[in-house]
Amino acid sequence: MHRICLLVILGTSIVVSFGISELLSALSSNPVGMKTKKIRQIRNTEDWPKMDASVKNIFWVVQISDIHISLYVDPARGPDLLTLCEDYIKRIDPETVIVTGDLTDAKKKGSIDTIQLKDEWVAYQNIMKKCSAMIRGKWVDIRGNHDCFDVDNFSSKNNFYRLFSATGPVYERKKNFEQGFIHSVFRPDGSTYSFVGMDTCSRPGPNRPFNFFGYIDEKQSRHLKYLSAVTASSNHTVWFGHYPTSLIVQSPPVLREIMSGSIMYLCGHLHTLGNLVPHMYAKHKTGQLELELGDWKDNRIFRIIAFDNDVVSFKDVKLGQWPIILITNPKDNQFLSPKIEPVEMIYFSTHIRILVFSHLKIRHVNVYIEKKFVGNAKQAELNSPLFVLDWNPKDFSKGTYKIHVNVETADKNTTSASQYFSIEGQERDFSLLPRLLLMLNIYTVMKGLFGLTVFVYVTTLTFLRQCLNIRPYLFQNRYPPCTFANGILMKIWLSSKVTSLFYLLIGSVLYLAFGPWFAGYLLTDHIGVVFAWGIIVNSTFIPGGHTYIYAMFQFLSFSFPLTLVVGHVLDQRRRHGSVPTVRKNILFVLFTLLLFAFVVFLACGEFVRAYGKMAFLLGPVRTGNMVLLPLAVWLALKADLKVTLVTSTF
């Protein structure tokens, strides 16, 4: 008995230790053993141009993400995107517009059934072509998970990205384009900036909900390594894709190492989590920034990224916001990347540099540092959005300061922007929640968490079944939390002592972990089978990602409550010795009925609507729960407690 207890503690400790190690490793800013590529030399005042009043060494690009052009929901998304092009992008005049996925919504009316809709793609293409005609730069787009719904492979007839996007028709015939491609920006001075797009959609792309994670296989990893090597000599390399790196399943997880040496990775997909995390930014161990952009779908957000003498700054903007103020020097010290960009240029600079984009004439650009007025920035060149103000950075060489800019337009309205800076390179930390969302390997975390849950559940029930006397393991005092914990433990113990229930409960959880959940039309023309550890469809295996989240939900919403329900039945029978007493407990009966109603709702709901009636008929997990719940309660009501517990002590 004590050996079993020791095994439970030891196994749990090992799994928890690995989890803590993964967490600390992901959030560490000073890792050991991670090599970062060196792609630059330290610049000094003698051999490089200064950040002065010149407009020669600055350009900018625009990013948009998660447009979700839809035939059924929010018809203003398309027209508003056209407004963005006509009123904003045309004035901003970027070198490139990058769209990081979910170009269309691909959902039928009702927001559950998914299908690639040609009319949505045609609408997107029409807007994209109008926008492209307004700018001197190039429009570059890549697929998101919604653009992959129900798409068997990249060559499928319903992969409309090949036909109606900006990038797909141009690069489609190039070798390995669908795995990654390079868009280059060449500047007049001969410098090159590379933008590497990677399509991490699963192939095939199932209908929702099992299309939330991105995937990279060994072949794509090799191609991305090649692209990384090709772009190593660029002034800067920017990677972009739809999924955050935390939601890309890869074995081994080498993507961040492949991208090391690049200044940033641009993505979308998470939609600010319903505005819970409006600024989802982090910096990886390699020094690379990962910047998730809020969605166009509901929030109408876009991003401007400026490359000022290779010091990179950005600003997230909402449609309707004027003027747009982006301070490029001194750079916000939260986003300094000294391993990758020449941050020493800030120390050698002669001017504060501010990009101001406005639909009205600008009257004043007033600059303050630590609330002290330092001057009025002047336009660097006629019709240029760059405003400059001479300064001496050595006056601010120690510590962290806050720069504040007030812009007054012709209508006498004032807009402001501010940020912290540090000449000596002191960096500010990122918020914890964005770091967790972007830096953890969520696939590994959820897989480990579910594995730990199953391990603890199975070993706990096995240990308690061997336990003849539960009293020594109960709390002795009568505080409410202790009494509550004792009640839970007693119910689990009783569940484990009834042989039929023990094997039923253990078997259902092990089946959840290893057995097939259901079979259904994961693609319109192909039947697939879903497991916790992955999906098999059209002779292809897709590793589990989102499935582990559903597995945890299944355990917490059904498997564990079922254990408590049957344990409560047994406990009431132990206390009162009669079945009618259990039936008279109105709250318990109501809870059991609500749990059964919830089970029926799940069995007839999401999976069936998404994958057809077959998912209900061949659904051992959710459909099977409709039988498992009443069967377990019946076994608890019929169990012979006198025989079962004859050798046990209370």
Image (spheres, rainbow, N blue to C red):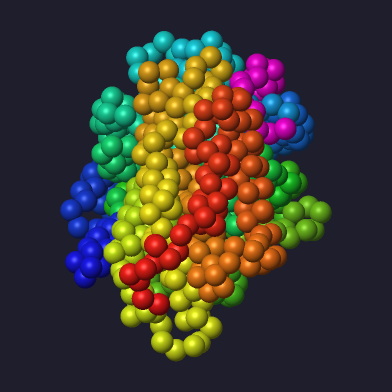
Q: Residue at x 43, y 66 (%)?
A: 642
For the C terminus, the image quarter is bottom left
Front-lying residue, 372 or 470: 470
Span of residues in magenta: 110-126
Q: Is residue 359 left or right of residue 226?
A: right
Residue 245 seen from this side: no
Residue in the image at 50% along x and 64% along y? 570
Q: Position of residue 257 (x, y in %)?
A: 27, 42
The image position of residue 311, as x and y in percent, is 41, 49
Which x, y percent locates residue 585? 66, 67
Which image quadrant for residue 20?
A: bottom left
Residue 373 occupies which quadrant of the picture? bottom right
Q: Quick one: which residue is furthest to the right in this view?
A: 411
Q: Residue at x 45, y 40 (%)?
A: 547
Residue at x 36%, y 26% (from the top left corner):
541
Per the image, is 438 magenta? no
